[in-house]
Amino acid sequence: MRIFDFLKRILKEGSKETEVKIEISLEELKREFQNKSDELKNRAKNLIFEIIPLLEKSLDELKLVNLENRRENEQLKEIVKENLQQYIFYLEKLLNNLKELDQKADIEIYLVKINTIFNNFTKNSAKIYQRANILIGKQLGNVKTILSNFSQEYNLIIKENQENNLKKYELVKKEDKQNKLSNIEKIEEQIKQKILDLNKEKEMEEKEILKNTEEKTKLLNSQEYKKELEEKRQTDREIEKLEKEITRFIDKVNLKELSKKYHDDEKKHKIIQNYRENYRRAIEEDKEKEFEKIIKESMNLEINLPEINEKILRLKKYVWPIEMKLKIFEQEIQNIKKRMEEIDETKKDEEKKLERFNLEKEEMNKSQFKLINKVNN
């Protein structure tokens, strides 16, 4: 027997005492649901309070990572260092966002905000983590473990909250039309509040864009950046000079004639042909400097091509610190713009919901009006 069928039977029997008890039971259920919401909110808050110091400790460990004494390829180490700095940037942002959470917010808004914070962090840092994890497995693994443990506990809260909300919804379904109308109005208010919250969230994102843009502009106008640009131009000129030095030497050697000269020497002829096809690649592959031996033997010329080429590569792969910061700022600005687009889409969905509820409320009001007329007649 459904609960409201049971209530109808009680009303027919005229048992006011039992009716009061049922009413009290419903109120007790509502209090129980609210108590559960409060409990879940406190658990979520405690999780946040617990994870912050753990992440701060891991952040300090990441900042102390030094790859200078590692034996891996220098280019690989530079890539890992670059991605480590980006990962630290987003981890610091995650911590700041967690610390700025509104602890007085409604549980639904509170959980949604936590989801948004961690989803943004995951979206921004996932690929960076994979690239940095090549050489920094332990420290990054600690962060991953902390986040994984948090996620397990947090998902339990989400699941229990969904179950709690479902029970509350089932209770709401058992109310009469007037209560349903009242609930619709409450839901409308919640949607309106959510739209307001989305507007505030968008406003915060706009401020964040402004802040990043100002920081970027400040960096662009700084003396440090101007100095870095000049150093970069000098480096580019040095690279150009070294590349021309190699090109002039290759032109001077005349590889075509040299190839004819050593046509009968299969080994030397192959080395010369490699230089004719792609002397840049050939220089990198010629670890034993066989080509230089041939040049010295045939033309009595000396040059250290691998050393010059290595210097060019080293200059090209240098990571300019301020330029990297500017890239991070620009990437963050693009990420914020994307989040703002998502906020706009969510807002449109909520506005559509609000419109549907308004129509439903109008239909219910009309239905009630007809019922009153029938009763009066």
Image: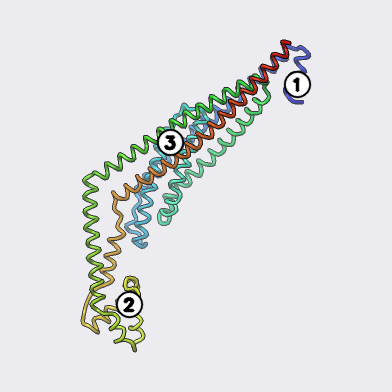
Residue drawn 35% across and 52% down?
82
Q: Which residue is mark 3?
A: 98
Picture colour scheme = rainbow
Q: Position of residue 258 (x, y in %)?
A: 28, 83
Residue 264 shown left or right of residue 124 in the figure: left
Q: Earlier in the sequence, mark 1 or mark 2?
A: 1
Q: Splitting the image into 4 quarters, where does residue 265 fall?
A: bottom left
Q: Residues within 10 Å of mark 2 (few under 14, many from 20)?
A: some
Q: Which residue is mark 1?
A: 6
Tell me the amino acid under the disc marked 3.
Leu
Q: Residues within 10 Å of mark 1 (few under 14, many from 20)?
A: few
Q: Quadrant of the N terminus?
A: top right
Q: Splitting the image into 4 quarters, where does residue 233 fall?
A: bottom left
Residue 315 shown left or right of residue 337 in the figure: left
Tell me the mark number nearer the camera, choosing from 2 and 3. 2
Q: Residues within 10 Å of mark 3 (few under 14, many from 20)?
A: some
Q: Earlier in the sequence, mark 3 or mark 1?
A: 1
Is residue 127 positioned above or below 8 on the image? Answer: below
Q: Which residue is mark 2?
A: 276
Mark 1 element type: helix
Tell me the amino acid under the disc marked 1.
Phe
